[in-house]
Each structure stands twice: as C-alpha cells, then as structure tokens.
Image (spheres, rainbow, N blue to C red):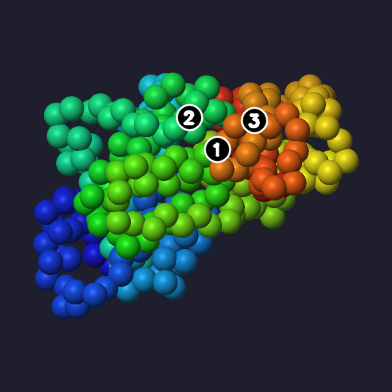
Amino acid sequence: MKVFKTKTELKTYFNGYSSKNFTIGFVPTMGALHNGHLSLIKESIKNNQITVASIFVNPTQFDKKEDLENYPRTLESDLSILQGVSCDIAFIPSIEEIYANTVDANHFEFDGLEIQMEGKFRKGHFNGVGTIVKKLFEIVTPTNAYFGEKDFQQLQIIRKMVQKNQLPVSVIGCPTFREENGLAMSSRNQLLSEKEKEEGAIIYEILHEVKQLINKESIEKINSWVAAQFDKNPHFELEYFVIADEENLIPASTISSNKNYRAFIAVHADKVRLIDTMAL
C-alpha cells in the first residue's frame, strides 16, 4: 500500500500510472476505522482498478470544538487495517495541506437538504462536509466514491453537491454495517462504554419496529411512540426522530404510495451522539 501525505505526491503517482483508462474508487474517512469503513473499501476494490482511502479529521464540519478535540484518532492502527484489506493508497493530508492558511468552509446550495434533521442541530455542518468532499474529489479525481447509508442525509447532500458542481464522479451509497446487536457501526462507538454499546441496540430495535408500524399507524402516533420509548430509558436521550421523504428529506405527515420514506434518529448516550436511519 502506498501512503501519500501531499496532493503533489498523489497526483504524480497517478500521472505515472501505466494505463490511462483505469478507474479510481475512493472512500473518504475521518479515521478510527471499523468494519463499516472496510465494507466500503472492499466494495471499491471489487469494482475499481485502484482504491484510495483518505484519513482526515475535517475541522470545518464540527460545530463544537470539544467534539473535534475528542474525535478518536488512531492513525497507526488505521493504516495497518487498510494494509490488511489490500487498499492501494492511503491519503493522509495535514490540515495545512488541505486548507493552507484559511480553515474555513465554503457555502453551498443544497436545495434545502441541509436544513432538515442534522442541519437543525449542527449549524454549518454540511457546508463543512461539502467543502472537504469537494476538495478531496478534486485531489483524488475518483471515478466512483463510496459512502455508508448510515449518514443518509450526508449521502444526499454529497450527491447534490456533485450534481450542482458537475463533478465527474459517481456517488455510491452502501448499506449500513451493524454490530451483532444492531447498533450502527460508527467511529464514535469507541467512546461508548461496553454497557452503552450493549444497550445501544434500542436504537435499531425502535427503527425496526417503526418499519412494522408504518403501514398500521399514523406518523403522529409513531412519533409519539418513539418519544415514549426514550422517556422510559434513562441511558439515552432522544434528540430527534423524523420520518422523511428519501429524495428531498422533507418530514412527512402522511404516507403516499408513490414515494420512498426513511426514518432518521439521533440520540445522546451521555456525551456521545449517535445517529441511525432505516428505509421504510
């Protein structure tokens, strides 16, 4: 596996590649790799000649300084993990390499996707996501880029950014990878206690029950039922639960037969914030 720290190194490597018709698969990450990341990398390896994984904790997408400071950083083990799954290239730039002297996010038009769910609780978050993903796409020039559906709102935001900026990359969503108890895999899970990880199964269980209820109960009743489940649980605090149209992410009040819907949830386990989603 090649490890590059600068844009110049990466571009020089691609310029010297023998075949000009190769495809590049790209998996951008913030490190603290888990099996969910590896499922994306394996999908890329299966479908591209070269797979690049980036590790970069992006400061412009954190709305709270303490979250940025507390984000797990495990570079040495991450590189070993990437080597173990035969990833071709690891790109590990510094903040200076990406942002030079101005660590600021650009402003993007996401047609309202950014004001729903996460956007209501994390001011400026998606401008930070759009900024770093666009920068990385321009550096890596991938044919295909892979993202997990756990962050479905982010996935739709990135698709919109690619469309509006006419970037020549296919954005591919991959199924959420879960622990045995159903808890969605996330780098933030490393900050949970073993008991919190075990009890985190409640998130998946509730989403699974919502999928059963969607054809039987009104959305209003489902929302009330979800809130009641967390009222009874002292270990997890519900931040939001929303059933929304998959395409535009607008919260639904009723179900239409010609649309696809998805449940979105965010909860706090002490100081750790967890999100999940499920197609309905």
Looking at the rendered structure, the kind of residue marked 2 is Gly
Contact flag, marks 1 and 2 (Cβ < 8 Å): yes
Please, is residue 276 above or below residue 251 in the view? below
Coordinates of residue 273 in the picture (x, y in percent): 56, 30
How many residues crowd mark 1 within 10 Å: few (<14), some (14–19), many (20+)? Answer: some
Contact between marks 1 and 3 (CB within 8 A): the answer is: no
Q: Which amino acid is tagged 1? A: Asn
Disc 3 residue type? Pro
| Residue 103: % across, % down | 23, 28
| Circle 2 residue | 112
Q: With respect to residue 34, does 158 lie above or below?
A: above
The secondary structure type at the circle numbered 3 is loop
Residue at image position (34%, 42%) is: 164
Residue named by callout 3: 251
For label 2, the SS is loop
Residues packed near mark 3 inside 10 Å, few (<14), some (14 to 19) or many (20 plus): some
Q: Are marks 2 and 3 in contact (CB under 8 Å)?
A: no
- Relative image position of residue 265 (x, y in whole percent): 65, 34
Is residue 83 in sight in this rendering?
A: no
Q: Quadrant of the N terminus?
A: bottom left
Q: At x 17% / y 41%, what residue is drawn?
A: 97
* Observer-nearest of 269 and 26: 26
Marker disc for residue 248 = 1
SS type, badge 1: loop
Residue displayed at 48% across by 45% down: 155
**CA separation, marks 2 and 3?**
12 Å
Residue at screen point 26% across, 73% down: 22
Tell me which numbered mark, 2 or 3, is placed earlier along the sequence: 2
